[in-house]
Image (cartoon, rainbow, N blue to C red):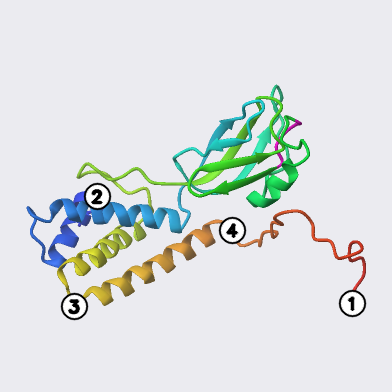
Amino acid sequence: MSFPSQFLDIQNAVLQKARLDPVLDGQRIKDWINQTYSRVCVETEAIVSTATMTCSVGAYSYTLPAQVALIRQMQVRPYGTTTLNPPLTRGTLDELMNKRQSGGDAPMGQATHYALLGIADFELWPTPATNDLILIYFVGFPTPLVANTDLPILEEPYASKLLEFGALVDAGDFNGDPSTPSWQADFDTWMGRYRDRLDHKAGTIPGQFHQWGDPWAAAGGYVTSGY
């Protein structure tokens, strides 16, 4: 197997270890590798990209871009400016519907809250009054491996091990291989290692906890002193 491992190298490793037929099972192996590839990239949040959405005046329901697997953060850039507002606050549909009552669904400014429903239904509040731009930082899906010479975007040595053992788990389930539990354990081990690798890559200084939603208020006012 070459280093870094190409798509064909990973296919051959799965083929040999699972003792599959290269003609009958070749496409299955490719699919298993790409399924593992997508799973690893999303679950480890390895691929973070940016995209933009343009608000429409008077519209509060949108469709999230298809490439977004997980929202990391979003900000609004007001129409006609180069500055960015504070990050959008994530809320629930109930919260946004309550805010829209009594005319609160009329165009009234720049969005400050959002709710994501299902895969792609994206709700905003307040209803945009101008064609503001929303900047999205998101975890994305990888481009599937197709050509035999394609290289995973993941770093080595994690890439080849993760894709090989992940595909082997599917192969073992397919043909009842007794090595399947061992392959699953190997995959879990390499997933843990890669998560640790990404955590270390981000640095050692702890970040501040992000506070979602509106501040909590006790009955009769805010808590201002200790108990």
Residue designated by label 2: 6
First of labels 3, 4 by sequence position: 3
Cβ atoms at labels 1 and 4 below 8 Å apart: no
The amino acid sitting under disc 1 is Tyr
- Quick one: label 1, few (<14), some, or many (20+) residues within 10 Å? few
Q: Quadrant of residue 191?
A: bottom left
The amino acid sitting under disc 4 is Gly
Residue designated by label 3: 178
Cβ atoms at labels 1 and 2 below 8 Å apart: no
Specify whether 112 is left or right of 51.
right
Q: Position of residue 34 (x, y in %)?
A: 29, 51
Asked if residue 66 is among those painted magenta in the image, a careful observer would answer no
Residues rendered magenta in the picture = 108-112
Give the residue at x 65% y 61%.
205
Residue designated by label 1: 227
Residue designated by label 4: 203
Quadrant in which the C terminus is drawn: bottom right
Gap between marks 1 and 4 measured at Cα = 36 Å
Quadrant in which the N terminus is drawn: bottom left
First of labels 2, 4 by sequence position: 2
63 and 85: which is toward the camera:
63
The amino acid sitting under disc 3 is Pro
What SS does tag 4 mark?
loop
Q: Which residue ends up furthest to the top in the rendered image? A: 80
- Which of the two marks, 3 or 4, is nearer to us in this view? 3
The chief SS type of the magenta part is loop
Gap between marks 3 and 1 measured at Cα = 59 Å
What SS does tag 1 mark?
loop
